[in-house]
Image (spheres, grey):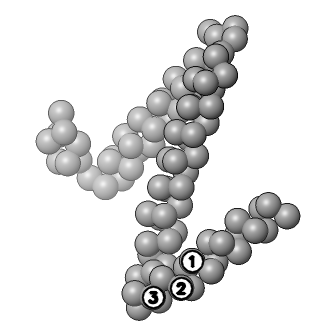
Amino acid sequence: MVEKFFEMGPIWQALVATIFTWGLTAVGAGAVFFMKEMNRKVFDGLLGMAAGIMIAASFWSLLAPAIEMSGGSWIPACVGFLSGGVFLFV
């Protein structure tokens, strides 16, 4: 099945990947409708996992390219990341 995916053109790969991620998001969000109450520890764990995924996504799609564009210096990316965190906090 993976080989078939790699044999597709880039437009079809993007479409399949988009539908796949949409489907997983819909299943995860739809699980809310079947739960009356949730244990607080489970809820905290799920929130922590979501936060970790978003931090990883921000690093790989924003910070890593910013470090690469700045010639390998991590200082501009770090200052921008921390400034964004302070802005959101305020």
- For label 3, the SS is loop
Residue 69 visible, this angle = no
Asked whether the beta carbons under mark 1 and mark 2 sit within 8 Å of each other, the answer is yes
- Amino acid at dot 2: Ile
Residue, disc 3: 73
- For label 2, the SS is helix
Q: Residues within 10 Å of mark 3 (few under 14, many from 20)?
A: few
- Amino acid at dot 3: Ser
Asked whether the beta carbons under mark 3 and mark 1 sit within 8 Å of each other, the answer is no
Above or below for 76 versus 33 = below
**Residue at the spot x=70%, y=8% of the render?**
36
In three-dimensional space, the C-alpha distance between marks 3 and 2, rounded to whole angstroms, equals 6 Å
- For label 1, the SS is helix
- Amino acid at dot 1: Cys
Residue, disc 1: 78
- Numbered mark located on residue 8 in the image: none
The single residue placed furthest to the front in the displayed view is: 41
Image location (x, y in percent) of residue 23: 48, 29
**Residue at the spot x=47%, y=55% of the render?**
56
Q: Quadrant of residue 10?
A: bottom left
- Numbered mark located on residue 75 in the image: 2
**Residue at the spot x=44%, y=63% of the render?**
60
Work out whether residue 7 or residue 30 is closer to the camera in this orientation and state it. Answer: 30
